[in-house]
Amino acid sequence: MILRSLTENVRTQNWFAVGLDFFIVVVGVFIGIQLGNWNDERSDRRDEARILRQLRDDVIAAKGLAERTAEARITVLDEAVNALDVLFDRSDREELSESECRALMATRAIVLPFTELSSFDELVSSGRLDVLRDDELRASLIQLKQVVAAADRASRQISQGQTALAVDFPEFVQTTGVVAEGTNGRREVGTIATCDTAGMKGSQAFLNTTANAVDRYDAFVRDVVTPWRAAINRVHTRLDELLEPEDTKQQP
């Protein structure tokens, strides 16, 4: 209809009417674009709210794993350091405890169970990272991915040449596998370690190797475990800050 009116007005050289028709067309196009942008914005905000909740669920699971893993690795490090004090006569005790002996054997395990954030990976792969409006959250998520990648590389580097003390020095270590009832009726397998402390102290090769092993494990905890846990905690804290107002609204 507008096109027919415009054609007729041009034919009759009614320039005022032609200008009015153009104005109506331009305004109509502008309103259509604005409505489309508004609908897209509403859709993005709904997607953002859903993604934030999914992200928090993923991060809570990752944080739980990180906390349990970090606590276990730090416990091993503390016990291994105590063992060094005994072996290098910096302690009043003459014998290693069973937990210290087991910790020395555990320094071989330089690995972390990194957990992927599937909701964030989906955003990145689909090119929709800009749906997240909060700059701090986006930065902390990107940093977490970078920390995980760096931690994986560092773990591989630190683990190269790491000694399995129980394998390399079987004359000083005796390990026994034990089975006990665990949770949900499943059996759990563990290890009891017994160390020949006197023999260890008398072997310079063992002392040198053990000092190096504990030093590597300390680097693992410091440069891999600690930054990984801190990066996850930063994301979790920011998500809680962003979702707290929404959670408050949903409370009766």
Image (spheres, helix red, strand yellow):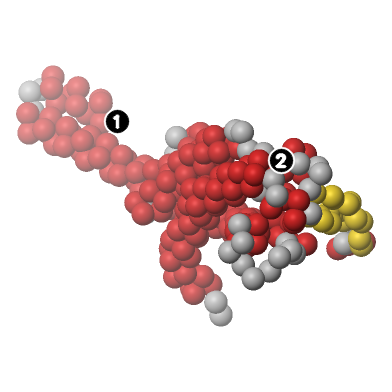
Instruction: Compare residues 138 and 47 and report the one nearer the observer.
Output: 138
Residue 216 found in image quarter: top right
Q: Residues within 10 Å of mark 1 (few under 14, many from 20)?
A: few
Question: Mark 2 or mark 1, which has the lower sequence index?
Answer: 1
Instruction: Compare residues 64 and 208 and report the one nearer the observer.
Output: 208
* Residue 105 visible in this rendered orientation of the protein: yes
Q: Residues within 10 Å of mark 2 (few under 14, many from 20)?
A: some
Residue at x 58%, y 64% (from the top left corner): 90
Residue 210 vs residue 240: left or right? Answer: right
* Residue 117 visible in this rendered orientation of the protein: no
Residue at x 49%, y 74% (from the top left corner): 248
Q: Which residue is mark 2?
A: 164
Res 1 label: 1
Is label 1 in a helix, a strand or a loop? loop
Location of residue 8 in the rendering, given as x and y in whole percent from the top left corner: 18, 24
Residue 112 vs residue 191: left or right? Answer: left
Residue at x 42%, y 46% (from the top left corner): 143
Location of residue 108 in the rendering, given as x and y in whole percent from the top left corner: 68, 44
Is label 2 in a helix, a strand or a loop? loop
Location of residue 73 in the rendering, given as x and y in whole percent from the top left corner: 63, 55
The residue positioned farthest toward the bottom in the image shown: 252
Residue 128 vs residue 58: left or right? Answer: left
